[in-house]
Image (tube, rainbow, N blue to C red):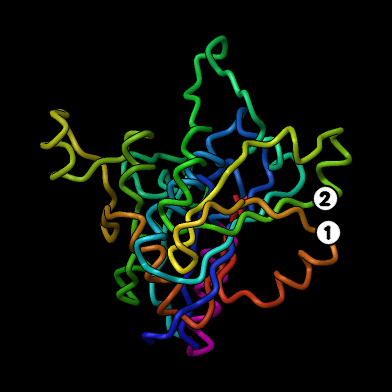
Amino acid sequence: MKLAVMVNEGPYTHQASDTAYNFIVAALDAGHEIFRVFFYHDGVNNGTRLTTPPQDDRHIVNRWSELSNTHDLDLVVCVAAAQRRGIVDPDEAKRNGKDSDNIAPGFRISGLGQLIEAGIQADRLLVFGD
Amino acid sequence: MSETKKFMYINRRPPCGTVYPLEGLEVVLIGAAFEQEVCMVFISDGVFQLKQGQDTIDSGMKNFSPTYRALGDYEVTRLYVERESLEERGLTEADLMPLTWEDEDDDWAEKPSIQIVSRTQLSDLLEEQDVVFNF
């Protein structure tokens, strides 16, 4: 089955991001296709490479990046939600006059149209949030 | 995959206090460009999103409630409000913004966008959907 996933909460504060990750790993293991993972609301905070959790905890951001690298996952961060929360890629940093970017490897910033397209293209859209 | 899907956007939170209603509305407005079969649902404290006369000045928050009036122009013409949620909060349809849309198939007649429906009717509507977002 072709699946799309929406993640609506940030890492560590909520379990939504962990549950989405675990679901995707299980779905891929079971042979399903992940069309796209879309990060919205505080979910965009899953995509900052500046995240530095304690050594003895899971690294949620790196875990997404690695999964994207291994399975060629399309991890999309909503641009409008990202701008509000300070998640920027090099292009956005330049466009908005910021001195740095912080997007994590494997993530890309794009618009809400990517979410709607995922809803149209996928057999199921799964929402993980509060 | 050119077929049209049924999209439902469920709003269950009050307009202020969190950014979910505002960001949810942004999804609806962007989604309107994709010409799917769209409806919005207001349940629980989400019914407050449609309340008339919202004033956020003292809170310093953005008052985005006028944006709901634009939904008709985006061809988002079905806004279902749950009757039980209204009643539980002491509200009636008269407390809500008079949202309308113009029906081009009926000589641009102005028609109400808000439909008050029961919990049972909503449950049936939900059953029909292909894609359900909730904010």
Q: Is residue B112 magenta?
A: no
Q: How many marks?
A: 2
Verify CB contact (< 8 Å) between mark 2 and mark 1.
yes
The subunit carrying tag 1 is: B
Amino acid type assigned to the residue bearing label 2 in the image: Arg
- At a point 62% along the width and 74% down the height, the residue shown is B129
Q: CA distance from mark 2 to mark 1?
A: 5 Å
Instruction: Give the quarter of the figure containing the N terminus of chain B.
Output: bottom left
Front one among A59 and A27: A27
Residue B125: where, in percent of width, then height? 71, 70
Q: Quadrant of residue A34?
A: bottom left
Q: Is residue A25 magenta?
A: yes
- At a point 40% along the width and 71% down the height, the residue shown is A118
Q: Which residues are magenta?
A: A18-32
Q: Which residue is mark 1?
A: B118
Callout 2 environment at 10 Å: few (<14), some (14 to 19), or many (20+)? Answer: many
Residue A83: where, in percent of width, then height? 31, 37
Callout 1 environment at 10 Å: few (<14), some (14 to 19), or many (20+)? Answer: some
- At a point 55% along the width and 71% down the height, the residue shown is B131
Mark sitting earlier along the chain (2/1): 2
Q: Which residue is mark 2?
A: B83
The subunit carrying tag 2 is: B
Location of residue B65 with respect to B33 vertically, above or below: above
Residue A1: where, in percent of width, then height? 50, 88
Location of residue A14 with respect to B65 vertically, above or below: below
